[in-house]
Image: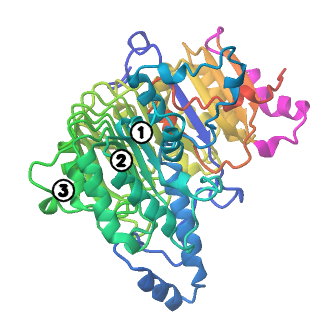
Amino acid sequence: MGPGIPDPNVWPNFSAHHHSAPPPNRNPRRRPSPPPPAAMDEQQVLLGISRSDMLARIERCGRDPAMLDLGSNMLLHFAYEYLPDPPVSPTAPLSLAGASWVPDGVDRISRLPDVVLRDIISRLPAKDAARTTALASRWRPLWRSAPLALVDNHLLPDGGASGPLIIGAPSPRAVTAAVSSALAAHPGPFRCVHLTCSTMDEHRGEMARWIDTLVAKGVKDLVFVNRPWPMDLRLPATLFSCASLTRLYLGVWTLPGTAAVPRGASFPNLRELGLCMTVMEDRALAFLLEKSPVLEFLLIMWSQTGVRLRLVSHSLRCLQLGYTHLEDIEVVDAPRLERFFLRNVSLPGTGKFTINSPSRIKIGGAPNLRVLGYIQPGQTELGISNTVIVAGSKENIVPSVQILAIELHFGVRDAVKKSPRISEKSTGKVNLKFWQEGGPMKCVVQSMKKVFFYEFQGSRSEVAFLKFIAERGRVLEQMVVVVSSKCFSWVDDDVNVKLKPLTGAKWSSKACKLHIFKSPRTDVAGPLCRHNIACDFGWADPFDLRYYYKAERMSVS
């Protein structure tokens, strides 16, 4: 085996995930992730631009001004998708209806110790927690001493059932006022506070007081999102003094410069940080990492500026980057980093954001990196130590990686052929000979134990790839092929014909099991890996989406 490729005996759990992406513009059914608004062609489409300036720019381009709210609404909905769910829900009713069956009618719940009752109250939405004061005199003082869970979405008339508010709708002033009242009335601490409904620019005074109150009263879990104009609204620097935080998600803010941050500010207890649609400088991001000594999970989605990510963290375990403009990504010293996820990361040289922008990534000190993806051959450049190599050659696969996810456009030969180790004399089609000529790929395949192929389109090039793995996978134990929903019209005979080269191949591993499923999904346009699963270490393989387990199994003879 060549350098950088571990022996199968010391790399026993390697599995690979391949997502078969249709050629560009060939499949009209795209995943409903929001595209940038019309007329936003430059890379820094939203950086520091006011709503009026954006409208003027759109009108100069001859576009419909209504596109601004439409596009912004889609972006904001996208940001909401990456926010964690609050730990409390208004759909769980507070009811004593079951008490009538108690034989003696004695209120035994109120006899529980204070610590237990406070824990019960802390698990209720803010409204229900306050209502416990009416249950009995025993409960009245407990609300003020129980950690409060405040979610402004729950204060809407429908309890947030209709989902996030649309852009252009009036800011819910009643909700903003209720948040101010609750924060003032409760002495703290706050178990969690999720503030996502208010247009912060209209309530700058309240916003500053909210942050001061949360810092003073010790919030632990904070989600703080602006809706969303102006895009350059600066986050109050006092938030950086909140030492009690264990989880922090920020959306649609400009992070303050380090000079504005209070002296001695840090996040000594912060374990999880999410930055969604943020404007930030290199130093601001480096400062956040430096001042978060126990940070384990970092998510950066839709970053609006091309910052340099130079990762130095002795605590970080999971890094997620997506739809983000980054000048550089360098993992310098991250001894605990186990998972590294990328999704449509754009780097310089393109002049605009495109999902196929080349990505340059250097991975140095990450000896425990186990999970890496999605890599796009020819689009993602991986560098090990100080060498930058296009993804696909054997030297650039980090030796510790056991689970690798790759997105391939099998119908576009140039999109697959980007490895310098694949001969330029390869045949014109992405067929079996094409893969056989890629020597390093053979070494990688020989170490695989599991292969998951999502959204199989039925093309010959896909079948050739799977056959290549079957004939070279010496230790292969399982191959799962999930057939795209667009192929649901196939009958079993059609499936048999298309997969005959695979089922009739000379499998290197006689013990390998082939499983073929019909995909239940209809919105596929790119690879998926749910961000909440990505950071859940209870899922050994975050790319094993498992949705196909509920799908119909296809019989192949």
Q: Quadrant of the N terminus?
A: top left
Q: Magenta stretch containing residue 495, yes or no?
A: yes
Residue nearer the viewer, 406 or 257: 257
Whether residue 292 is situated above or below residue 61 in the rendered picture: above
Residue nearer the viewer, 402 or 206: 206
Q: Residue at x 87, y 35 (%)?
A: 494
Q: Tell me where residue 238 appears, x and y as whole percent.
A: 21, 57
Whether residue 251 is situated above or below residue 110 in the rendered picture: below
Q: Residue at x 48, y 45 (%)?
A: 126
Magenta region: 485-511
On the image, which quarter does residue 335 sit in? Answer: top left
Q: Amino acid at mark 2?
A: His
- Return the residue at label 3: 283
- Return the residue at label 1: 143
Assign a secondary structure to mark 3. helix
Q: Is residue 108 left or right of residue 115?
A: right
Q: Residue at x 16, y 58 (%)?
A: 261
- Return the residue at label 2: 186
Q: Amino acid at mark 1?
A: Trp
Assign a secondary structure to mark 1. helix
Label 2 neighbourhood size at 10 Å, few (<14), some (14-19), many (20+)? some
The residues tagged by marks 1 and 3 sit, at their Cα atoms, a distance apart of 41 Å
Residue nearer the viewer, 464 or 37: 37
Of badges 1 and 3, the one in the foreground is 1
